[in-house]
Amino acid sequence: MSCNPKVNCTCTYTSCSRHGKCCECIAYHKRNGEVLGCLFSEAGERTYDRSVENFYNDYKNR
């Protein structure tokens, strides 16, 4: 399976080597038990806290 870079990546952590590379990003966060930044609200994503607990709180407060 090939993985094409995502053009409209919403992650604000632009210095990340995986920025815009969805397959690499998914694998990295899955390996670390984290949620992808692109699934958070804009404010939640900017916390850089990718924990499941933070995702739940972000989702609950939308």
Image (tube, helix red, strand yellow):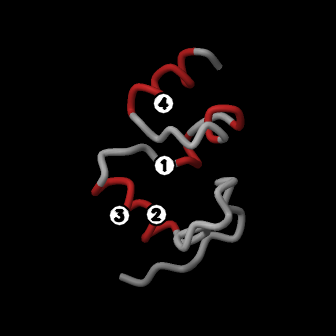
Asked if 14 appears above or below 48 in the picture, the reply is below
* 25, 6: nearer the viewer: 25
Q: Please tell me whether mark 3 sits on a helix, a strand or a loop.
A: helix
Mark 4: few/some/many CA within 10 Å (<14, 14-19, 20+) = many
Task: Assess whether mark 2 and mark 3 are in contact (beta carbons under 8 angstroms).
Answer: yes
Question: Against 9, is 62 above or below?
Answer: above
The residue tagged 1 is 36
Question: From mark 4 to mark 1, how far is it between C-alphas?
Answer: 9 Å
Between the residue at mark 3 and the residue at mark 2, the CA separation in whole angstroms equals 5 Å
Residue for point 58% across, 37% down: 40
Q: Earlier in the sequence, mark 3 or mark 1?
A: 3
How far apart, in angstroms, are the residues tagged by discs 3 and 1? 10 Å
As drawn, the label of residue 55 is: 4
Label 3 CA crowd tier, 10 Å (few <14, some 14–19, many 20+): few
Q: Residue at x 47, y 79 (%)?
A: 3
User: Which badge, 4 or 2, comes first in the chain's sequence?
Assistant: 2
Q: Earlier in the sequence, mark 3 or mark 4?
A: 3
Residue 2's x, y, as percent? 42, 84
Q: Which residue is mark 3?
A: 27
User: What is the secondary structure assignment of the residue under circle 1?
Assistant: loop
The reply, left or right, for residue 19 in relation to residue 14 is left
Q: Which residue is mark 2?
A: 25
